[in-house]
Image (cartoon, grey):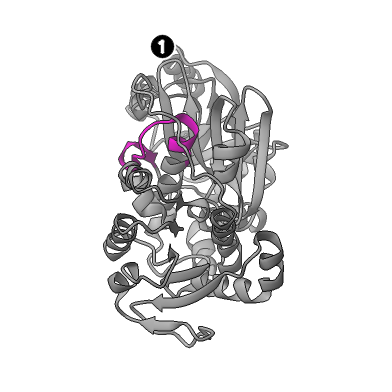
Amino acid sequence: MRIGLAGLGTVAQGLLTLLKENREQIIAVCGQPIDVVAVASRTRREVDLAGADFSHDVLALAKRNDVDVLVELMGGEGIALEFVDAALNGGKPVITANKAILASHGDRLFELAATRGVMLGIEASVAGGIPIIAALTRSLAGNSVERVTGIINGTCNYILSAMSDRGERFEDALAKAQQLGYAEADPHFDVGSIDAAHKLAILAALAFGIPFDRAAVYAEGITDVTPDDITYAKELGYCIKQLGIARRTAAGVEMRVHPTLVPLGTMLSSVNGVMNAVQVNDNATGSLLFHGPGAGGRATASSVLADLLSLVRGDRPIRRLAAATTQRVLPIEAVESAAYLRIPVIDQPGVFARIATILSEHGISIEGAIQRERAIADRKVPIVVVTQPVREAVMIKAVAALQALPAVVDRVRRIRVEHAAA
């Protein structure tokens, strides 16, 4: 099999290394070698291409007749999307790790691949080396998936783990992540939950047969999480993770990414550092956790290689669930979840009772609470409560009412709670 490789970054270099190191095993598994014969990249790096042709013309690579499959590892949209379009239109199978183009253009690209009768391999687009795409589209394809919950951004997981384990502030944990190469110089794509939203859109489309639609995913970043929130969460029996949650309900499908209180002792609560994990709940197996490296050259290249082997062996391309027009995506206001509230108040009698009354007036029950006996500074004291599940629209109104109390002296902080992440 002759490969045309677009991109020469970390994952592409990892693929070149694996193809060389594992050459004999690859031949044994699929009966033929897999060789990169042409590489195109906007940047030339000092990488051993093992004799492959090199060019800066990415689109010309898509039209070469001496390659059997094209691998897109450039990332982003723009030229990468043009490359994938040109390759599929030319009747060439494509393997990509590009979550951005799939989250926004996946429906059209899969339809184009089906029309041309070629494979579109996307295993590497979500969770690095974890075979979650194969699980959803093959191993669990006959089961009715009810929920997909994931820690799917290693940068955010590293930052929140550092804040929890070492008591670091968000800014210090982010700086360390940048120093170690886990975060970019501009980290907004990660800490703003955009990266995780792309990945969740892909998982939800495959799990529930809904359209690929990044715009339908509610995304909230982790920048407002403080060491105090981490501490109070632990006291209440939780840790804080950035979760991507896709859930099928009677009313529709939820798709949301945000900081989340997860009960200690659950599977997802033990996933730390830069690791990723995806938990799938379905009507046959119950709950399954897929855990492993969510990024890195070799790990992600492993998923690219898996798609290449699948193509060589003649496996059928991914067949998506027929789009279910009756399954609407719920707006965040219609989603129901429990909540952690940290309410900074003036230390005076009756404040907690007034807070409890406002929550009760909105039909919100308190599951747990922390009330400091002494003010921390300037007579300010935090009151922390965890509520029972309630619709988002109701919680927004309740928080606004709490914020309007004269005794509340700063912004009420809210983080959603997921008891179902067990």
Residue 29: x and y in percent read 69, 60
Q: Quadrant of the C terminus?
A: top right
Total count of labels = 1
Binning the other alpha carbons within 10 Å of mark 1 as few (below 14), some (14 to 19) or many (20 upward) gives few
Residue 293: x and y in percent read 62, 57
Residue 208 magenta: yes
Residue 307: x and y in percent read 54, 55
Relative to residue 304, is residue 144 depicted above or below? above
Q: Which residues are magenta?
A: 203-219
- Return the residue nearer the eye: 414 or 264: 264
Answer whether residue 241 is visible to the viewer in this image: no
Q: Is residue 414 left or right of residue 397?
A: right
Residue 203: x and y in percent read 48, 40
Circle 1 sits on which residue? 361
Relative to residue 314, is residue 21 depicted above or below? below
Answer whether residue 387 is visible to the viewer in this image: yes
- Return the residue nearer the eye: 37 or 369: 37
Q: Is residue 157 left or right of residue 190?
A: right
Q: Is residue 302 left or right of residue 40?
A: right
Determine the secondary structure under disc 1: helix
Q: Is residue 1 left or right of residue 101?
A: right
Relative to residue 87, is residue 131 depicted above or below? above
Q: As shown in the figure, which amino acid type bears the numbered disc 1?
A: Glu
Location of residue 417 by image quarter: top right
Q: Residue at x 56, y 68 (%)?
A: 297
Relative to residue 390, is residue 43 depicted above or below? below
